[in-house]
Amino acid sequence: MSLIKMYCWVDLETPGLDFNKDPIIEVGFGLSDGGFKPVVREEAHLDEPLFEGSVVKPTPYILTRLEAAATAVQQMHEGSGLLEALQRADAGTGFGATIGDIEDGILRKLTRAEQYLRDEGRVSTGDKVLWKLAGSNVGFDRRMLEVGMPRLIERLTYNNYDVSTLREHYKDVVGIPHPYESDGYTHRAQDDIQDHYREARYYRDLSRHDMEPA
């Protein structure tokens, strides 16, 4: 039996940093294999995965935590358009989803991806697919998911793929400034997780270039 490692890319938006009090208010999500290629049938023709963003329908508790958030956080979410999106979701427009529904959707996509990989022969019978949580500053996201999406955490392996570690490596160990030219974080989960994914690909390509013989 072989262990096949895949990446479950996740970025979260929250009203604060308290794992036990601050709820998830937006989720960005996508899947890739260890070579950063799509692993969903509908994305097979693409060079990179499609990333999804889901706004959480605000409960009274979510609204209370947003009102209690630091001014800078409120301004950030207002400037990004997330507060407006939450207001739309709260207005009964059919926009947004419960955190449980978003978690169900991610779990279904993981299952479909595994079946597609087996159908295509990329995963053999008896092999076990291990989904790594991937993103930037993943330790924070994992703690939030342990509270907000525990069934997803059960589906993931314990180790992470953290782009922020690669970023710090080049800054502190290699001794060069952060070389990846980001489009800039929008503080919207879908945009930011796509940017983290592209940053990871950049470091992969940079490492391959560094290892090429002179």
Image: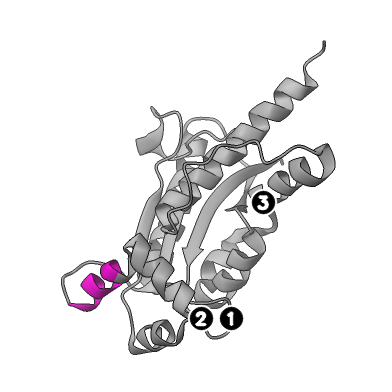
Q: CA distance from mark 1 to mark 3?
A: 20 Å
Quadrant of the rendered image containing residue 181: top right
Three-letter code for the amino acid on which mark 3 is drawn: Ser
Q: Residue at 60% of width from left, 37% of height from top? A: 180
Q: Is residue 36 left or right of residue 26?
A: right
Residues at circles 2 and 3 in contact by the CB criterion of under 8 Å:
no
Instruction: Give the number of the disc on residue 22.
Output: 2
Q: Which part of the image, by quadrant, shows the N terminus? A: top right
Q: Is residue 85 left or right of residue 117?
A: left
Q: For mark 3, what is the residue?
A: 164
Residues at circles 2 and 1 in contact by the CB criterion of under 8 Å:
yes
Compared with 184, 205 (above or below) is above
> Residue 167 lies in magenta, yes or no?
no
Q: CA distance from mark 2 to mark 3?
A: 22 Å
> Is label 1 in a helix, a strand or a loop?
loop
Magenta stretch: give its range.
Answer: 84-91
Q: Nearer the viewer, residue 136 or 48?
A: 136
Three-letter code for the amino acid on which mark 1 is drawn: Asp
Quadrant of the rendered image containing residue 170: top right
Q: Residue at 48% of width from left, 30% of height from top? A: 120
Instruction: Give the number of the disc on residue 18.
Output: 1
Quadrant of the rendered image containing residue 35: top right
Q: Position of residue 18 (x, y in %)?
A: 58, 81
